[in-house]
Image: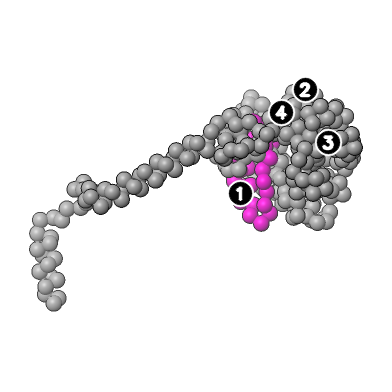
Amino acid sequence: MASHATGDGGIPPRDAAKRGLTRIMTLGGAYGTRNYTVKGLRDQKGKRVLCETLPFSPDEAAAAEEAGIDTMKVRFDPKSPESAAAVRQAARNTFMAFSVPLLAAATADEAVRLGYDAMAIGADAIMCQWSPRLIEAAAEAGIPVQAHAGLVPRRSTWTGGLRAVGKTVDEAVWVYDQIKTFENAGAYAVEVEVIPEDLLIEISKRTSLMTSSIGGGSGGDIQFLFAEDILGNNAPPYPRHSKQYRDIYAMQQAIQKERVGGFKDYIADVQSGGFPAKGHVIKAPEGLMDGFLAEVEKKG
């Protein structure tokens, strides 16, 4: 556990305040500093739109924190928690909700246990695709929960596949009712995926939950985009709701081309006798080889 005098990032209280950070203790019992608390996030509702991303590596998390991202989601695998823990350590001062696997909890008790496991390694909240019953159990146990509404990919068979949701009156009301159910279950936020922008604008006005928009336009309290989309990590085609601010994929392809070229040059250099050259080898001291060969001859 970190000392009372500093956070888990080693920031003295006075310096933390100057940087706009709040001293906290995690549910797991560790002292730290964060840019936001759950209360701090909810205090922003209706005042300004926050920026959220999901990094896939510690390097991406560190870059997002340095850039000033407001919140992050982090994928959490209870069977190998080291990956999420590494991302947490790379961005110690940023509010993080660990995204827990849908199938990892089948009962209320399992949901609470999974939530506690995430909080024990530094999560500030969990994000889930659970039913209201499991959300209520986790929230009652003191775990801040972000729910998921609209297009929920793993439940997409119920809404007709991977498509926009809420384009009919019945679907729009269903999305609203679902979000109100999550609110009543004790969630603090809800990710709303691929619904009409105007619908999310009106829903956001009618719920106390922080609405995190991914493919829901500008109607949310939080704008959410995966780091791999922001950075252009992958080749096209890209999701319609995404925007690429860098082209790391092209850079990676150029680096790979350089790797191939380097190996080709090495092979050609060896085959032509150019490597190793005099500068790459150790020259035998004068008399070494004569003495060595004489000794070997004696051995027969």
- Disc 1 or 3, which lies upstream in sequence? 1
Amino acid at pointer 3: Gly
Task: State the quadrant of the C terminus.
Answer: bottom left
Dot placed on the residue nearer the N-terminal end, 1 or 2: 2
Tell me the residue that label 1 is attached to: 83
Residue stretch in magenta: 69-95
Task: Look at 56% across and 39% down and name the residue there.
Answer: 235
Question: CA gap, disc 1 to disc 3?
Answer: 35 Å
Residue at 68 percent across and 30 percent down: it is 51
Which residue corresponds to mark 2?
47
Q: Is mark 4 in CB contact (under 8 Å) with mark 2?
A: no
Distance from disc 3 to disc 4, alpha carbons, whole Å, reads 24 Å
CA distance for labels 2 and 3: 26 Å
The residue that label 3 is drawn on is 166
Question: What is the CA distance from the residue labelled 4 to the residue labelled 2?
Answer: 10 Å
How has the structure been colored for display?
one colour
Measuring 81% from the left and 27% from the top, which residue is drawn there? 198
Residue 205 percent location from the top left of the image: 85, 27
Asked whether 12 or 205 is in front, the reply is 205
Identify the element where label 3 is drawn.
loop
Residue at coordinates 68% horizontally, 34% vertically from top-left?
240
User: Which of the two residues, 169 or 185, is positioned nearer the viewer here?
Assistant: 169
Q: Which residue is mark 4?
A: 50
Kind of residue sitting beneath label 1: Ser
- Left or right of 6: which side holds 155? right
Q: Are marks 2 and 3 in contact (CB under 8 Å)?
A: no
Circle nearer the viewer, 3 or 4: 3
Residue 249 vs 108, above or below: the answer is above
